[in-house]
Image (cartoon, grey):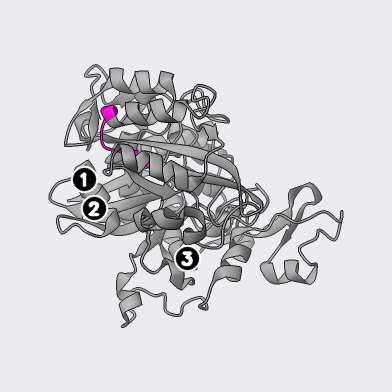
Amino acid sequence: MQYICDFHIHSKYSRATSKDGNIDNFAKWAQIKGINVLGTGDFTHPLWLKELKEKLEPAEVGLFKYKDKKLKNNHNGFFVNNNNQSEVRFILTTEISSIYSKNGKTRKIHNIIFAPSFEVVEKINTHLGWIGNLKSDGRPILGLDAKELAKIVLNISPDCLIVPAHAWTPWFSIFGSNSGFDSIEECFEEYTKYIYAIETGLSSDPEMNWRWSALDNITLISNSDAHSPAKIGREANIFEGDKISYNLIKEAIMRKSNDLKLIKTVEFFPEEGKYHWDGHRNCGLVLEPEESLKYNNICPRCGRPLTIGVMNRVCRLADRKMGVPTAVGVPTEVGKKRIPFVRLIPLAEIIADVLGVGTGTKSVDKYYKKLINVFGNEFKILLEIKKEEITVASLLEIGEGVERVRQGKVSINPGYDGEFGKINIFGENEKPKITEAQKTLWN
């Protein structure tokens, strides 16, 4: 059996998040998306932790299920018909923002913590509460060295897992160009041996990470970092096994389990991430790494430093060229370790591109809901359902759009300095001519 897992999300108690970020909506959207295991996020926040305790109950060891039996499969127009509520599991996770000085430089590092039980969570929260204010933000900011965070958490429970979050983003990550480190060892020192994985983030993908041999023994995982329920699953991890539990997930990430394997990750096209290339948003300037070098990383329009993006940072640390040895199946020990990945675009974005409207419009919502109601969930549509079946249930162009994404036949203006990239599934001369009737009526 395969399990689609998204471990990194944020509740309504984190800054810049949707007010709809409650456990009811996350349970609902996990069904709609087809997610089997969802991270709770934000377990350090007392009000969110209270909600989690009230609305979740134990399932498999270290996992939890939503216990509101009154929530039926009719969710505001969605009739989710292939996934019972009991099949959605939650795993206790949170993200900590560490801001501190080390080796003469200010560091801003985000780390995801996985915990096996509410009892362990309570102990972590008590200890971290002595250091900073956990009530101020679902993703608390602590003046705590990332190494010390690992020490505290692992001393409380060796069953916890620490994963550097969105490892390459410029401002808040272990390898970020503005406040990160040049190696895991520099950040975590003697606790490096407990760092088994990093989260690649929306602006990078495994192929980019494979360019750096220092990560050869590090598992690359991908999560949505969703700030609203509808965004969960935009990146995810696919595990395979006969059963699942907290320990099996942890051991699979550590590559020590024979019963559960991480077999694939689901990725953004990294160009769509908002820090893929270099640039300066205020000046509307976006540059490839080679172009930035010509300007000494200074904006030629205003004279201020450019925001150095993920691709530039990867190029700086990489000791391999793209594709050497990166492809799955390369007959080397390095190549054999690679976990495959697939790049996808969220279904609502595909529909919006076809219709030539925004993702939040009624016409997109209408087609999205019908496809979910017909086929069961979004991941099933994006990964499994045949183009012809999608066409019958919606439009020829939507079926074609899904197929093009699967084949990687898209063009993207890369994101930079906080601006998401712009995706075009169809070229200028191939834009579908959708009538107003097609936008509003069903066949």
Distance from Cα at disc 1 to Cα at disc 2 = 6 Å
Q: Which residue is mark 2?
A: 251
Task: Measure the C-alpha gap from mark 3 to mark 2.
Answer: 22 Å
Element type at marker 2? helix
Is residue 132 something one can see in this rendering? Answer: yes
Looking at marks 3 and 2 on the same chain, the residue that comes earlier in the sequence is marked by 3
Left or right of 117, for residue 293: right
Tell me which amino acid carries mark 3: Asn
Q: Quadrant of residue 150?
A: top left
Amino acid type assigned to the residue bearing label 1 in the image: Asn
Label 3, secondary structure: give it.
helix
User: Is the C-beta separation of discs 1 and 2 under 8 Å?
Assistant: yes
| Label 2 environment density (alpha carbons within 10 Å; few <14, some 14–19, many ≥20) | some
Give the residue drawn at x 46%, y 48%: 147
Badge 3 is on which residue?
Answer: 209
Select label 3 or label 1 by which is in front: 1
Q: Which residue bears the numbered disc 1?
A: 247
Is residue 397 shown in magenta?
Answer: no
- Image quadrant of residue 59? top left
Nearest the eye: 33 or 279: 279
Quarter of the rendering occupied by the C terminus: top left
Question: Percent x, y for residue 80?
Answer: 28, 33
**Which region of the structure is painted magenta?**
113-119
Q: Which mark is residue 76?
A: none
**Considering the numbered disc 1 on the image, is that residue within a helix, a strand or a loop?**
helix
